[in-house]
């Protein structure tokens, strides 16, 4: 098993590559780091604190947690952790749990509605706090799984981009862990013994499509090691002319292009 120094360097390299490759951070940015209490968001915060310290530019971060009023949520854990870390933070209290449980039909998964409500609340908080960017803790496995979920179940080629602008065009959303492996994040979180807060809202739903996709990828990796790296490379090597989307490639005018080139 890798020691803490090795895994820290590994994650920092991956985050640095993502920040550089997708031009994530600029001088004067104020970035809201979304902290859920899971392994990914703790790792994200540590990485952002590291780069704030060593980057040749100046930017600010504020950690924000949304307390969704789930039964049994340990309210004291994150404030204590953040105070000990000497990080600027804000806890937002909003009973989205009640809304999700009331609106979700029995037997259906809560993730979609929960995600929408959470996203809207966090965007609003970022504006209130004067942040121009918002950082989320999604990693490489999340990106690949989302791509396959959309491919198999939603009928579209789409995934979580490392950087995008929200619908209203006033916030840039970042995923600095985009190139990090989940297994590395897990090792890092275990070694640092983060005070993990489990999600009782969706974590208890066993038949999620995402879990099926995760199992499928795990099985592939056993037979064909490092498939996830190949899939990640594929998402960065897209050829619109070799797909079937007419809005991305002008199939209609291929004949006229040939005629023009022949003269």
Image (cartoon, rainbow, N blue to C red):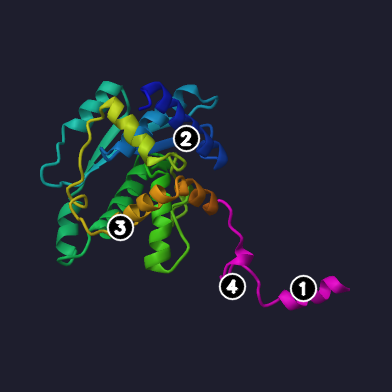
Determine the secondary structure under disc 4. loop
Q: Residue furthest left?
A: 72
Tell which circle, 3 or 4, labels the residue nearer the N-terminal end.
Answer: 3
Tell which circle, 2 or 4, labels the residue nearer the N-terminal end.
Answer: 2
Question: Does the magenta-highlighted stretch encompass residue 249?
Answer: yes
Contact between marks 3 and 4 (CB within 8 A): the answer is no
Mark 1, other Cα within 10 Å: few <14 / some 14–19 / many ≥20: few
Quadrant in which the C terminus is drawn: bottom right
Mark 4, other Cα within 10 Å: few <14 / some 14–19 / many ≥20: few
| Tag nearer the camera, 3 or 2 | 3
The residue pinned by badge 3 equals 212
In 3D space, how far apart are the residues under numbered discs 3 and 4 (Cα atoms)? 31 Å
The residue pinned by badge 4 equals 246
What residue is rendered at 24% in x and 27% in y?
Answer: 81
Which numbered dot is residue 257? 1
Which residues make up the magenta segment?
236-263
């Amino acid at each position: 098993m890798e020691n803490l120094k090795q895994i820290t360097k590994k994650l920092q390299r991956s985050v640095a590559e993502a920040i550089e490759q997708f031009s994530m951070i600029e001088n004067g940015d104020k970035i809201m780091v979304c902290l859920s209490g899971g392994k990914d968001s703790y790792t994200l915060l540590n990485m952002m604190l590291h780069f704030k310290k060593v980057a040749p530019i100046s930017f600010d971060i504020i950690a924000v947690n949304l307390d969704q009023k789930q039964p049994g949520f340990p309210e004291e854990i994150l404030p204590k952790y953040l105070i000990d870390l000497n990080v600027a933070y804000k806890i937002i209290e909003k009973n989205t749990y009640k809304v999700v449980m009331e609106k979700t039909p029995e037997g259906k998964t809560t993730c979609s509605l929960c995600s929408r409500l959470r996203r809207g609340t966090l965007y609003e908080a970022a504006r209130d706090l004067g942040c121009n960017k918002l950082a989320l803790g999604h990693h490489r496995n999340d990106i690949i799984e989302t791509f396959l979920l959309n491919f198999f179940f939603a009928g579209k080629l789409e995934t979580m981009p490392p950087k995008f602008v929200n619908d209203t065009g006033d916030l840039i959303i970042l995923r600095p862990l985009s190139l990090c492996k989940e297994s590395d994040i897990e090792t890092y979180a275990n070694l640092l013994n983060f005070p993990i807060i489990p999600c009782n809202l969706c974590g208890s739903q066993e038949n999620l499509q995402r879990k099926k996709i995760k199992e499928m990828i795990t099985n592939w990796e056993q037979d064909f090691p490092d498939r996830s790296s190949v899939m990640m490379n594929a998402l960065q090597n897209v050829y619109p002319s070799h797909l079937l989307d007419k809005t991305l490639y002008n199939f209609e005018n291929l004949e006229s292009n040939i005629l023009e080139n022949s003269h």
